[in-house]
Image (cartoon, rainbow, N blue to C red):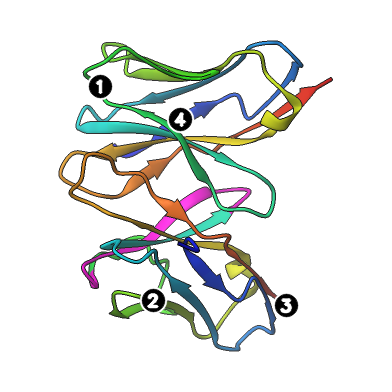
C-alpha cells in the first residue's frame, strides 16, 4: 500500500484565492482526519470523518474552511478565501477504527503558504 | 479538558544516553496513549502506544511508562542514536471517540 497520499506537497497562493487540498486514505481505512500543524499551536484536529460522514468539525476555524469526503478513497479540504494566517502544514490521516488499536497513518502533508 | 501537556519543548542528548519526554493530562476518560515520531518534511508516524491498564510497555529501545494516579506518561529512549533525532508527540484518545489530542511536541537532538 502506498500509504496516505496528499496533494499537492506545496502550495503557494495569494490572499483571497481558493485553495483545495486533497487526500487519498489507505484502502480499507474507515476514518479520515484533517490536522493543521503550526509552530505556535502544534497539531490541531480540524475535522474527522467516519465511513465518509463528518463526525466532528468543531476544529474547523471558520466558515472559510470546508471539507468533503464523497467516497471512501478521497477527501478534500477547501479554504475560500485564503488568508496569510492559514499558512501551515495540513496533514491528512486515516485509520481503521473499531479494531484493537487506534493508530493513525499520516500523509506527508501539504505545506500551504498564503502571501 | 482535552489538553495534553508535553515537556520539554526541546531536548539535547548525547549518543548512547537516555532521552526522557513527559506528558500529563487531566481527562480521566482518555483510554489510549500513543507516541508519534516526526522527521522533517514527513507526517508523524506511530512509534509505540499504551492503554491505562498497564504501567509500562517496551518495544526495543523505546519504553512508555504510565502512571494512572498521577495522570502522567513518559517516553524513554534508551541508547539514543543520532537517527532518533526528530520531533516526538504524545497523544491521547477519549473513550468513545476516535480522535487523538496531541501534545505540542518535543524536538530531540542526539549529538555524537
- Secondary element at tag 4: strand
Residue contact between numbered discs 2 and 1, judged by CB atoms under 8 Å: no
The one nearer the camera, A38 or A95, is A95
Q: Is residue A58 magenta?
A: no
Q: Nearer the viewer, mark 3 or mark 1?
A: 1
Chain name for mark 2 = A
Q: Where is residue A108 in the image (x, y as percent from the top left)?
A: 58, 60
Q: How far apart are marks 2 and 4 (CA)?
A: 31 Å
Q: Nearer the viewer, mark 1 or mark 4?
A: 1
Residue beneath disc 1? B52
Q: How far apart are marks 3 and 1 (CA)?
A: 45 Å
Chain name for mark 3 = A
Identify which residue is drawn at 81% across, 22% down.
B111
Chain name for mark 4 = B
Residue beneath disc 4? B5
Q: Which of marks 2 and 3 is in front?
A: 2
Amino acid at each position: 500500500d502506498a500509504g496516505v497520499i496528499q496533494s499537492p506537497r506545496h502550495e503557494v497562493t495569494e490572499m483571497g484565492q481558493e485553495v483545495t487540498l486533497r487526500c487519498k486514505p489507505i484502502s480499507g481505512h474507515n476514518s479520515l482526519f484533517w490536522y493543521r500543524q503550526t509552530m505556535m499551536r502544534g497539531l490541531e484536529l480540524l475535522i474527522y470523518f467516519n465511513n465518509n460522514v463528518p463526525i466532528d468539525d468543531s476544529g474547523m476555524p471558520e466558515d472559510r474552511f470546508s471539507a468533503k469526503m464523497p467516497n471512501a478513497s478521497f477527501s478534500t479540504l477547501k479554504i475560500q478565501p485564503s488568508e496569510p494566517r492559514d499558512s501551515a502544514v495540513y496533514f491528512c490521516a486515516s485509520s481503521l477504527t473499531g479494531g484493537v488499536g487506534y493508530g493513525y497513518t499520516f500523509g506527508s502533508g501539504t505545506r500551504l503558504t498564503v502571501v | 479538558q482535552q489538553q495534553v501537556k508535553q515537556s520539554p519543548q526541546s531536548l539535547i542528548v548525547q549518543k548512547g544516553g537516555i532521552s526522557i519526554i513527559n506528558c500529563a493530562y487531566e481527562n480521566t476518560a482518555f483510554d489510549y496513549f500513543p507516541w508519534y515520531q516526526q522527521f522533517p518534511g514527513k507526517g508523524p508516524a506511530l512509534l509505540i502506544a499504551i492503554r491505562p491498564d498497564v504501567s509500562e510497555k517496551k518495544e526495543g529501545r523505546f519504553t512508555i511508562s504510565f502512571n494512572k494516579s498521577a495522570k502522567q506518561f513518559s517516553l524513554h529512549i534508551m541508547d539514543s542514536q543520532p537517527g532518533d533525532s526528530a520531533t516526538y508527540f504524545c497523544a491521547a484518545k477519549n473513550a468513545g471517540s476516535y480522535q487523538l489530542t496531541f501534545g505540542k511536541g518535543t524536538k530531540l537532538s542526539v549529538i555524537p
